[in-house]
Image (cartoon, rainbow, N blue to C red):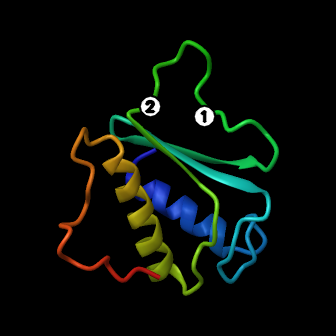
Amino acid sequence: MKAERLFQELSHHWSDPGGRAGTGDGGMPEEGTLYVERSGDEFSWRVIPFGAPLEPPSGAGEKHPDARIFRIGEVPAGGPETSRKFFDELIAEMETMAAGPDRCRWPLDQPWPDVP
């Protein structure tokens, strides 16, 4: 799926009390660890149940993703704008891990950005 669809699905999963694992008002997903990967410009994601091996959804013999991230923790409440900002930051953090030896996103003399 493309990035925009990824953001839609993630935002829906953590904001719809009947359709996802969280609490309906932000918070931590109850059923596990969020896993997101990117291959080229295609993304995929899933929630890995707590206690299950943290294995990516790719099958044996398939190409490894270009970037991936595992996330356990709270997802901020606040509606679609807050959710989008949170997941934008998560994907940006994932991309820094695939950026080579210079993986810092901000100059050292600037404060950390204010992200809920």
Q: Name the residue at the bottom extreme.
A: 78
Q: Nearer the viewer, residue 19 or 23?
A: 23
Identity of the residue drawn at 56% across and 61% down: 10
Dot 1 lies on which element?
loop
| Amino acid at pointer 2 | Pro
The residue carrying mark 1 is: 56
Q: Residue at x 22, y 66 (%)?
A: 106
Instruction: Choose top left, top right, bottom left or bottom right for residue 73.
Output: bottom right
Say whether residue 15 is left or right of residue 115. right
Q: Position of residue 53 (x, y in %)?
A: 74, 36
Relative image position of residue 55 (x, y in whole percent): 65, 33
| Residue at the image position 20 percent from the left and 68 percent from the top | 108
| Mark number displayed over residue 2 | none
Q: Earlier in the sequence, mark 1 or mark 2?
A: 1
- Viewer-side residue, 15 vs 106: 106
> Is residue 57 or residue 2 the one in the foreground?
57
- Read off the residue under disc 2: 65
Is residue 70 shown left or right of residue 32? left
Q: In the image, what residue occupies the spot 57% across and 47% down?
A: 45
Structural crowding at the residue carrying mark 2, measured as other residues with C-alpha within 10 Å and reported as few (<14), some (14–19) or many (≥20): some
Residue that lies at the very extreme toward the right in this rendered image:
51
**Dots 1, 2 in contact, CB < 8 A:** yes
> Dot 1, how many residues are within 10 Å of its Cα: few (below 14), some (14-19), or many (20+)?
some
Decide: is 12 above or below 116.
above
Amino acid, disc 1: Pro
- Residue 85, compared with residue 72, is above or below; it is below
The x, y position of residue 5, in whole percent, is 46, 55
Residue 89 lies, in percent from the top left, at: 39, 66
Q: Residue lying furthest front in this view?
A: 109
Q: Identify the element where label 2 is drawn.
A: loop
Of 35 and 5, nearer the camera is 35
Compared across the picture, whether 50 is left or right of 81 comes to right
